[in-house]
Structures are given as C-alpha cells and as structure tokens.
Image: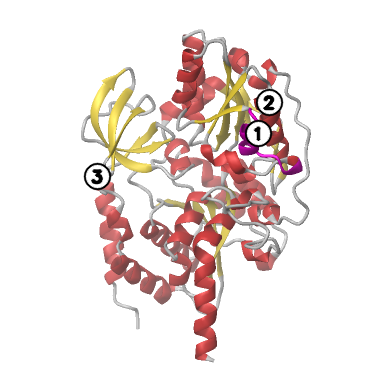
Amino acid sequence: MCLAIPAQVMELLGDGMARIDMGGVSKAISVALVDDVAVGDFVVVHVGYALSRIDADEAERTLALLREAAAMETPS
Amino acid sequence: MRYVDEYRDPELAKGVAARIAAEVDAARHYRFMEFCGGHTHAISRYGVEDMLPRNVAMIHGPGCPVCVLPVGRIDDAIRLASDPRVTLCTYADLMRVPASRGASLLKARAAGADIRMVYSTLDALRIAEAEPEREVVFLAIGFETTTPPTALAIKQAKAKALRNFSVFCNHVLTPVAMRAILAGESDEATALDGIVGPAHVSTVIGARPYEFVANEYGKPVVISGFEPLDVMQSILMLVRQINEGRCAVENQYVRAVTHDGNARAQREMDDVFELQESFEWRGLGMVPHSALRLAEAFAAFDAEKRFGIHTVAAADNPACECGAILRGAKKPTDCKLFGTLCSPETPMGSCMVSSEGSCAAHYAYGRFRDRSRARMERAAS
C-alpha cells in the first residue's frame, strides 16, 4: 500500500487530474495535492494521487553521496 | 525506470556495504527499527540484511496499515458489507486479512457481499455517482500517506452532494505509534539505537514531527527512500550519528521529502479529520490520540454514524505472534505458525497478508536466504 512509484507527468487533463507514465504504464491520477505540476515533472504517486514532486538536483546529489561512500578508502 | 534503477545498482550497494562494515564499531551492537512496511519489504526483497555486518540488526516496526488494523474493525467491515444495500470499496490488501471465526472480506464476497477492490478513492466516488441506488462505503485505512486522498474524496462527495457515499475511517498516525514503541521499551538489551523513518508518510508530514525521538528519547532518526541503496545509505547515516554520539533527525530522502512536508495535504487532513480519543492497534493495544475520525462538518459522510457501527474488540488467534512482531519484540521465525499453518496462501495473522507485512516479506524472500546461510555455515564448520 505504501509502495509508491516515481512517475512522469505526460499530460495535464484539467480538474486536478493528469496522465502519467509509470515505467510504460499510462494512468490518469489526481495532482490536486501538489502545487503547479508541469508536464515532464516526476512525482511520487500513491493510491492514485501525486504526493510530492521529485527534485532532480537532490536526486543527483544523493547519488553523488552514495558514489562517494562506496568509493572511499577503508580507514587503516 | 528513472529514479528507480540507479538506486538499485548492485556494485554501488557493495561499496556502501563495505563502507558500513568499515565504520561500525566492532565492540558494540546497533539495533535499528525500520518503522515502515515499505522498508521491511525492500530490506527482505533485496537482501539488505545480508550485506550488513553481524552487529547491525534491523528490527521490523508496526508501519504496515493492513497489519495493525485490529480484528474488531475488520469484523465491522464484513458486517457492513453484508448489508444488502451496501457496496464496500476497499484497497486490495485488506481482502485476505483474517477476521473473527475464520472470516475475511474475500470469503464475505464469495458468499454474496458486494465488495469491490479499488485503486483509488476516486474509483469509489465514481461508483457512488454511477450507482445512486447503492450505499457506497469506502473502507479507509493507512497512515498519513493515504489520509489526504481520503480527505479529498470526502470533500468532493460534499461538493457534489453525494448522499450515498460514506467513509469507514481507520486512518492512523505515524509519530504517535513511534512514541508508543519507544515508550514501551523496558529492556536495555533490546532497546533500539535508531529509527529508519518512513519515506512516503514523510512526503506528507515532513521531517519535523520526528524531532521528539531525538529530543525526548535521545535516538537518531534518518528518513529514508524506499530503494535498497536509499536504505543502505540511511543505515550508514545512523551508524555515523551513533559513532559520533549525536542524535538528530536527518533526511536521506531529500529528493521527495522536505522539513515541513506537503502543506496542502496537511491542510486537507486538518479540514476533514479530527483526533479520536483512543484507537486499538494490533500489537500496541489502545493508543490515545493515534487515529482520526471525520470532523463534525463532514459527519454526514461518516459510515460509523450512518450505519451505527459500535466496534467490539475481538481476540487474535492465540497461537499467532503478529502482535509481538509488530512491536519489534519477535521475528517472524519466532512464531510456530510461520510457514507451516500460516503462509500467504492461508494467512492466520495479518503480517502474512500484505507484501509489506514482516511475515509475508520473510516468507517470500528471507527464508530462502536463511536456508542458504545455514548450509554455508554447515559447510564451513
């Protein structure tokens, strides 16, 4: 139930609804809970509602931290 | 898939695992609770536990909405659905949860009750509009992730003056349950050292509500994304906090979670719901101010008022350890029903039903690793 998936907004349908793409699956969901959703945005979708936008810069920073942690030399 | 695949890179995972192993203090134990069932599922599915040093233990928490819903409330839902006027709409996860006397929503449907699985509250609204002669009741469960969608549906029903739509509300609150777990700790040896905080609950409520864990209980919290690399990075962050003698609320899932959360979703919840004095949780018992009910302005859409529901507490199967497992006091394999009488096909307890339940996750993924680990240890000795 809580396993929401990142999805990309493909089309705004009006009335607080949008068509999204989830790994090739297309679905109409509500974007009424997230302000100013635009086509191309990635959102976290949960039981048919977008809950938050995914911040591309923060996602990249998290990956950079992961790469840094993975590549660090073991302290001797 | 973008934002998924890159957080499942096995090479990167090995590197982060080596980093955790290099940084843990061999002289101590680290006991971390992943509160949320989504994390329990990810940890089991991707074998995260096997990549951790032996002195880092993950304890499963109560954050699985299907698992914590007490038997009495499922009995209520079955009684509701048995009313010939009622169409009960529910999330699919609830269909197989065992209720009293071996009943379940699935069996009630087989016996003729009009029970429909929906993906979203919007589906339940559509059914109510399309079938005005039916009393459509939405069985609302879940933490703060599923609550705003229920709030919006109730507001829409009011705006459309839908007289045949109501909600049987079982929405519960994460921070209150977290406090109940921490307040219930009695044994120094089994006390938690830190908490992996929920991902999607936190998109709604933000990082702020967890500050009491650090301030009052002196334990670190790291809010984590749901992918395996997210969880591993969060564990590394917890290890570092402990090694440095710090306790703070940190946010690993910065790509989706902010400090204050989703203000709009919080507003919707505040508009539509108010606190219940007390609510029963499987495993935690009665917890004060831990659940929501419809506020007075929306009382017309409250199924409990409309159908005169008075919940009668019902006992769990006495042989089932779900309660202790939900508190983090026991593991699925400590239950004598696990994998024998109780399996996902024939669940005896709620933790075996949803894919987020500790027992279901361990049955699907963990038990095979248990076996291969035992084989390897035998071969090595």
For discs 3 and 1, the disc positioned in front in the rendered view: 1
Would you name the residue on which mark 1 appears?
B108
Q: Position of residue B307 (x, y in %)?
A: 70, 18
Q: Residue at x 28, y 44 (%)?
A: A23
Is residue B21 found left or right of B269 in the rendered image? left
Task: Tell me the magenta residue range.
Answer: B101-112
- Whether B134 is drawn above or below B204: the answer is above
Q: What numbered label is drawn on residue B241?
A: none
Marks 3 and 2 in Cβ contact (< 8 Å): no
Disc 2 marks which residue? B82
Q: Are marks 3 and 1 on the same chain?
A: no
The amino acid type of the residue labelled 1 equals Ala
Tell me the kind of residue under disc 2: Ser
Of helix, strand and loop, which one carries label 3?
helix
The answer to if B248 sits in the magenta stretch is no
Q: Do discs 1 and 2 share a chain?
A: yes
Q: Chain of mark 1?
A: B
**Among the 4 quarters of the image, the one containing residue B273:** top right
Chain letter of the residue beneath label 2 in the structure image: B
In the picture, measured across the screen, residue B40 lies left or right of residue A32, that is right
Q: Position of residue B176 (x, y in %)?
A: 62, 41
Give me the C-alpha separation between circle 1 and circle 2: 7 Å
Q: Position of residue B203 (x, y in %)?
A: 42, 39
Residue under label 3, please give it: A56
At x 47%, y 10%, the residue is B159
B306 and B271: which is toward the camera: B306
**Quarter location, residue B102:** top right
B210, above or below B273, in the image: below
Marks 1/2 in contact by CB < 8 Å: the verdict is yes
- The amino acid sitting under disc 3 is Ala
Q: Main secondary structure of the magenta part?
A: helix
